[in-house]
């Protein structure tokens, strides 16, 4: 499982997203986690792949890339993200 965070660092959500990332990594350091700027090529590609239309877009995916759960335009609680990231769904 992997957690992807797609966001625009030059937006009003920047500080909230960065705080979420800091807290999540501190609480769940073994979870595979990737933060991508949607204004950069890799972030743009991932946003297109998963159909992200607004940000922040936080998504939990299986190793094959299929979506387990996502949050769009909101910052979820860390424990909610971990629930999906550590589940066997």
Image (spheres, rainbow, N blue to C red):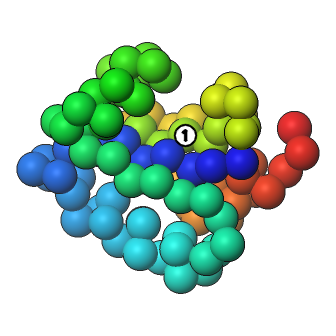
As drawn, which residue projects farthest toward the right?
Answer: 88
Q: For residue 56, which quarter of the picture? A: top left
Q: Residue at x 65, y 38 (%)?
A: 61
Q: What count of labels does the image hold?
A: 1
Residue drawn 41% across and 38% down?
57
Residue 30 in view here: yes
In this view, 80 is above or below 57: below
Q: Which residue is mark 1?
A: 59
Does residue 32 sit above or below 52 in this rendering? Answer: below
Q: Relative to residue 33, is residue 45 depicted above or below? A: above
Residue 6 point in image, percent of width and height: 36, 42
Residue drawn where x is 53% and y is 58% of the image: 33
Label 1 CA crowd tier, 10 Å (few <14, some 14–19, many 20+): many
In which image quadrant can residue 59 be found? top right
x then y, percent, for residue 13: 23, 52
* Location of residue 79 in the rendering, given as x and y in whole percent from the top left corner: 67, 65
Residue depicted at x 87% and y 38%: 89
Q: Position of residue 64 (x, y in %)?
A: 71, 30
Q: Quadrant of residue 22?
A: bottom left
Q: Is residue 26 left or right of residue 75?
A: right
Residue 45 located left or right of residue 62: left
The residue closer to the viewer here, 21 or 72, is 21
Kindly tell me whether residue 55 is visible in this rendering.
Answer: no
Q: Secondary structure at mark 1?
A: strand
In the rendered image, the vertical position of residue 39 relative to residue 8, given as above or below: above
Specify the farthest residue to the bottom.
26
């Amino acid at each position: 499982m992997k957690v992807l965070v797609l966001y625009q660092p030059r937006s009003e959500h920047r500080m909230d997203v960065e705080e979420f990332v800091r807290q999540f990594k501190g609480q769940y350091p073994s979870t595979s986690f990737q933060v991508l700027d949607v204004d950069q090529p890799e972030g743009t590609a991932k946003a297109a792949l998963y159909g992200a239309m607004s940000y922040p877009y936080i998504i939990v995916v299986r190793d094959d890339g299929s979506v387990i759960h996502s949050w769009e335009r909101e910052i979820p609680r860390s424990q909610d993200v971990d629930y999906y990231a550590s589940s066997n769904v």
